[in-house]
Amino acid sequence: KAGRLARYLGGRPTRNLLISDVPGDDPAIIGSGPLIAADPAPSPGAPDRVQRILDRVRAPSPPRPGDPCLATIRTAVIAGPADAAEAAAAALRARGQPVQVHRERLTGDVQEAARRIAATLISGAAGAHVWSGETTVTLPDDPGRGGRNQSLCLAVAQLIAGAVPIAFTSIGTDGNDGATDDAGAVVDQSTIAHGREQGLDAGDFLRRADAAVYLEAVGALVHTGTTGTNVSDLMIGWRTPA
C-alpha cells in the first residue's frame, strides 16, 4: 500500500488501471494506492500514529513523489461512480425516459441524503433522476439487519409516502449492501402504507438499523448476486407528472 508495491517492480513498464469507488477518484486512495506515491503531508495528528504502526509491523517507508521506482508506472482510472450513473441514464433514455443526472455525490448521514432525494422527487422535474455516492448510517449498540442502501430506501419511503407516484431504488454496485446478500431495495409512495398494514413502524426499524427486515416484509428487497465490480452506490428515482 501507499506505493510500496512499486518498489518490487524494479522499474518495469507498468500500466496501473483503476476502478474507483471513492469520492474524487484519487488514485492514492483507491485500493490504498499500491502503485501511487504516498501523500507527503499526512493529516494533523497522524504522523505519530503512523510511525507507531510502522514500527510494529516493520513496514518499509513508502516512496514519495519523484521516487525512481514510480517513473515507469502509468496510471488511469478506467471506471468509477460517474460511469455507473451515466450508464444508468443511457439505459433509461433508451427506454424513452427523460433523465436528469445529479453530478454531486451523495454522502453523509442517510437521513439527510433521504431528505435531499425526496425533495427532488416530490418537487423536481418528472422523469428519472440518477445519483451516485455512499451514505452513512449511525448504528445503535445492537444493530439489526440491512446496509446503507436499504436504510436510505426506507428513509426515502417515509418522506414520499402518499405523494404522487414515485419510485426509488438505491443499490450497491457490487451486489452487496452491508452484511446482507441483497444489493438494496426498491420503494415507492405506497411502501409505508403496506408496512402499516402489517403493523410495522418504519421509524422504529430505521432507529434499530433493521431496514432489511421491514423491506423484506413488504417485498422491496433487490437481490442481484455479487457483480465483481464496486463503483460505489447507485440511486435512481422516478416520478410521474403531477
Image (spheres, rainbow, N blue to C red):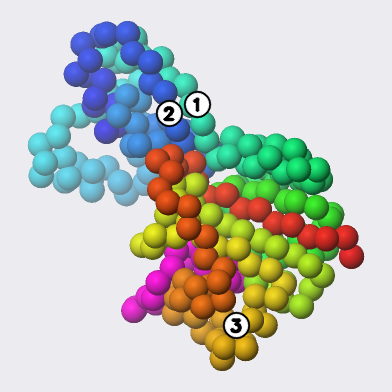
Q: Tell me whether the residue at label 2 lies in contact with that at label 1, contact meaning CB atoms closer than 8 angstroms.
A: yes
Magenta segment: does it hold 13?
A: no
Name the kind of residue labelled 3 in the image. Answer: Gly
Which label is found at residue 18? 2
In which quarter of the view is residue 152 placed? Answer: bottom right
In the rendered image, residue 229, in percent from the top left (x then y), is placed at 43, 39
In the rendered image, residue 158, in percent from the top left (x then y), is placed at 65, 76
Which label is found at residue 142? none
Cα separation between marks 2 and 1: 6 Å
In which quarter of the view is residue 38 placed? Answer: top left
Cα separation between marks 3 and 1: 42 Å
Q: Nearer the viewer, residue 92 or 126?
A: 92
Does 212 sit left or right of 169 as displayed? left
Q: Secondary structure at mark 2?
A: strand
Q: Earlier in the sequence, mark 3 or mark 1?
A: 1
Does 121 sit left or right of 59 as displayed? right
Which residue is painted at 33% across and 37% down in the image? Answer: 32
Q: Residue tagged by mark 3?
A: 195
Q: In front: mark 2 or mark 3?
A: 3
**Above/below status of 39 relative to 163:** above
Name the kind of residue labelled 1 in the image. Answer: Ile
Would you say residue 138 is visible in this rendering? no
**Above/below status of 13 relative to 27:** above
Q: Secondary structure at mark 1?
A: strand
- Name of the residue lying farthest toward the bottom: 199
Q: Earlier in the sequence, mark 2 or mark 1?
A: 2
Would you say residue 242 is visible in this rendering? yes
Cα separation between marks 2 and 3: 42 Å
Q: Secondary structure at mark 3?
A: helix
Q: Residue tagged by mark 1?
A: 78
Name the kind of residue labelled 2 in the image. Answer: Leu
